Image: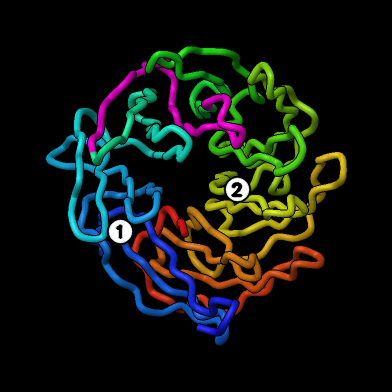
Amino acid sequence: IETGYTMIEKFYLGTYTKRKSEGIYSIKLNKNDKTLFDLKLEKKINNPTYITKNNDNIFSVSSNNNLGGITVFDKYNTINENFESSTPCYISYNHNNNIILTANYHTGTIIAYRFKNDKLVKLDVLSHEQESHMHYCKYTPDNKFIVTCDLGTDKLITYVLENDKLKKINEYKATSKSGPRHIAFHKTKNIAYLICELNASVEILNYDNQKGKFSLLNKINLVENNEHKWASAIRITSDSKYLYTTNRGKNIITALKILDNGDLVKIASYDTLGEVPRDFNFSNDEKFIIVGHQETDNLTIFERNKEDGTLKAINNETFAPEVVCIIK
C-alpha cells in the first residue's frame, strides 16, 4: 500500500453454488501490477447470487433445504437468517434507515425488512400479478422512493415505505416484452437509465423526484438487429460521463458516453473473454473494471481510459467460480 493511494482493493463475489462454488468469495485487485489475487471463501452458503454490505455486515440472498431467503453475517458469524419461500434474486440495504429489500423473480414478491441491533424484522410483503418477475428493488439515491423492476410485466413501479408498509406511488410501462432488469441514476441530473434484459436496450428516463414518476426520453439498443439479446448489468461512473452494460447473450461489455442532456452514445463493445458475464464493478478510482462470468468461472480485468471511456482487456485468467454479483 502506497501512502495516500491504496494499491490493493478488495471485492466480494456473490455466486451460484451449482458446480464449483461454495458461497461468497473475496478477491483482491493489485492496481500496480494489474492482477487479481487471493481468492478467499468468506462464507460457505447456498446460492448467494446477490449480496450487499454495510461496514462489516454482508447481506445475502441464500437458500436452505428448498427454501429461499436472506442471511446476514459479519466477519465471523451468521447474525440472522430468514427462509420462507424461493430464493430472491436481488437484495439492497439502505444506510439511511436500515431497511433491507429483496426482489423475488419466481414469486413476483418484494419484501421489506428492518435490520436493527443485529435483528432482522420483516415489515411488509407485496405480491404482484401472476406474470410478475421482480428483478430489482432499491431506494432512489435521494432516499425518497423505492424503485422496483418487474421483468415479467415490463413495469418500473415506485413505492414509499410508510408506517412500515409499502405503498405504491407510481408506475412506468417500459417497451412491451423488453424485460426491465436494473436501473442506474445520473449523479447530478434527474435522469435514470433502465437496462432491459429481453430486448437488450437501455431506456433513458426522466425522473420526477417529487412524484417518484418516470417518463421516457429516449432508448438505445445495445446489440445490432435481433442477435443474442440477454442484457445483464448496468453501472454509471461517479462523474456521470460514462455508462457501461454487460450482455450475457453475446458475452460483451458496452461502453456508452453520457451527453450533457443525459442521452447516450455508444462508444464500443468489447468481448468479456468469458461466458455469461453477469456483473461487473469499478475499482475505487474507476481506472479498472472487473467482469465476472457465471459459466467459465473467470474474472476479466479491463483498464479504463477515463478521458474517452474506452476499455482495454488486461487478462481473463483469474479463477472465480459461478460469479453473479460483484461488490466492493
Instruction: Left or right? Give the position of 145 relative to 44.
Output: right
The residue most toward the right is 260
Q: Residue at coordinates 26% horizontally, 67% vertically from top-left?
A: 41
Q: Which residues are magenta?
A: 119-146
Q: Which residue is mark 2?
A: 234
Is the residue 169 above or below the residue 116 in the image? above
Q: Quadrant of residue 27?
A: bottom left
> What's under tag 2, amino acid-wise?
Ile
The structure's colour scheme is rainbow
Specify the farthest residue to the bottom. Answer: 33
| Residue at which label 1 appears | 24
Choose between 118 and 67: the one closer to the eye.
Answer: 118
Q: Is residue 131 magenta?
A: yes
Residue 232 in the image, given as x and y percentages of width and height: 54, 47
Name the quadrant containing residue 117: top left
User: Of marks 2 and 1, which one's residue comes earlier in the chain?
Assistant: 1
Q: Is residue 168 above or below residue 251?
A: above
Frontmost residue, 219 versus 122:
122
Q: Residue at coordinates 61% horizontally, 71% vertically from top-left?
A: 302
Q: Please report the residue visible at 69 percent of the width from the left and 47 percent of the height from the top.
A: 222
Does residue 99 appear to the left or right of 226 in the view shown?
left
Query: Element at badge 1?
Result: strand
The residue at 66%/42% (across/down) is 226
Q: Position of residue 38 (x, y in %)?
A: 36, 78
**Disc ID at residue 45:** none
Sort mark 1 into few (<14), some (14-19) or many (20+) by Cα contacts within 10 Å: many
